[in-house]
Image (spheres, helix red, strand yellow):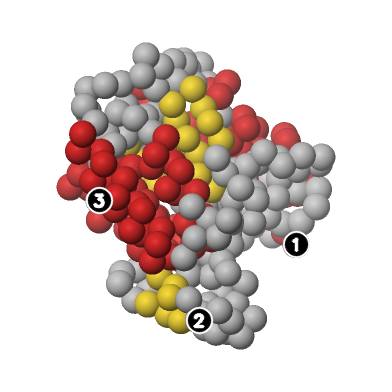
């Protein structure tokens, strides 16, 4: 089922209003961390796998539910009602990790709009799809609207920057100097919602970039059996460990997941 952006934003707002009747102290015995993202996080299969499938062994005392879906962007995840589903699922004490970016680029104004590209900018900018005529909002609008509805239920949100593509593609390390713009957008989203006390940021991009530098050319390339974006199961496991290490180090501030990390998780960068 496809949802219009306007209808979805209204439903997210309704979720926030409904949450007023929820006792914020009414927590599950075991909290849940939900993952919202694309194929780099999702369960895929065959030679490829998303990192979200390898997060559970790195945590204690919390259930992991992977709601990432291949091919999605902040826009399409919104329009399909998936953020609304999350806002309806969470209870106080739960955590939602939001990680998009790989599918968010391009121009929605094009006649060949793929339904995933966000409107350029980080605020209230609005574009019109050159294909469907729908209103298209910015990356930050989509993820921040979703986060506010989730936070209204007493849950916390971690904005996680997208993972890098293969930084050793071609045999030379690409470095961390120029990450894609959605890394900064995710960081900005956390800053914009900092006043809620329920939003934080993990620079997953830099963590993985540092890991790839340590692994070197041959090993990193071996983790990409199909293309320069999607990793093998071994690669996904390492990407999950990089996420956990970034959470442990609290580079960008402490996140609510830090207290659930297992002792003795490996160091990968």
Residue 153, quarter of the rendered image: top left
In terms of secondary structure, where does tag 1 sit? helix
Q: Nearer the viewer, mark 2 or mark 3?
A: 2
* Labelled pair 2, 3 in contact (Cβ < 8 Å): no
Q: Quadrant of the C terminus?
A: top right
Of residue 72 and residue 1, the one placed in the foreground of this image is 1
Tell me: 156 left or right of 263.
left
Residue 124, image x, y percentages: 30, 72
For residue 226, say whether it is visible: yes
Please, is residue 103 above or below residue 26 in the view? below
Of residue 1 and residue 46, the one placed in the foreground of this image is 1
In terms of secondary structure, where does tag 2 sit? loop
Q: State the CA–CA distance, disc 1 to disc 3.
A: 39 Å
Residue 78, image x, y percentages: 47, 57
In terms of secondary structure, where does tag 3 sit? loop
Q: Residues within 10 Å of mark 2 (few under 14, many from 20)?
A: few
Q: Nearer the viewer, mark 1 or mark 3?
A: 3
Q: Residue at x 47, y 16 (%)?
A: 60
Mark 2 lies on residue? 133
Q: Residues within 10 Å of mark 3 (few under 14, many from 20)?
A: some
Mark 3 lies on residue? 193
Q: Nearer the viewer, mark 2 or mark 1?
A: 2
Residue 163, image x, y percentages: 56, 50
Of residue 16 and residue 53, the one placed in the foreground of this image is 16
Report the disc number at residue 170: 1
Q: State the CA–CA distance, disc 2 to disc 3.
A: 30 Å
């Amino acid at each position: 089922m496809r949802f219009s952006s306007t209808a979805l934003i209204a439903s997210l707002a309704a979720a926030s209003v409904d949450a007023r009747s929820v006792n914020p102290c009414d927590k599950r015995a075991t909290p849940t961390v939900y993952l919202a993202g694309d194929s780099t996080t999702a369960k895929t299969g065959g030679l490829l796998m998303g990192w979200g499938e390898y997060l559970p062994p790195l945590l204690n005392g919390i259930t992991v539910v992977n709601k990432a879906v291949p091919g999605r962007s902040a826009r399409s995840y919104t329009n399909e009602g998936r953020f609304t589903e999350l806002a309806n699922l969470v209870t106080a004490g739960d955590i939602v990790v939001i990680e998009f970016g790989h599918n968010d680029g391009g121009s929605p104004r094009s006649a060949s709009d793929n339904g995933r590209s966000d409107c350029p900018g980080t605020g209230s900018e609005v574009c019109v799809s050159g294909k469907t005529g729908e209103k298209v909002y910015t990356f930050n609008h989509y993820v921040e609207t979703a986060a506010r509805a989730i936070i209204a239920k007493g849950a916390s949100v971690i904005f996680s920057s997208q993972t890098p593509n293969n930084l050793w593609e071609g045999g030379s390390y690409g470095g961390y100097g120029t990450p894609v713009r959605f890394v900064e957008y995710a960081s900005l989203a956390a800053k914009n919602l900092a006043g809620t006390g329920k939003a934080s940021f993990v620079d997953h991009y830099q963590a993985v970039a540092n890991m790839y530098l340590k692994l070197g050319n041959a090993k990193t390339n071996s983790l990409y059996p199909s293309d320069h974006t999607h990793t093998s199961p071994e690669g996904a496991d390492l990407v999950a460990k990089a996420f956990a290490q970034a959470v442990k180090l609290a580079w960008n501030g402490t996140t609510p997941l830090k207290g659930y990390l297992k002792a003795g998780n490996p160091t990968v960068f």
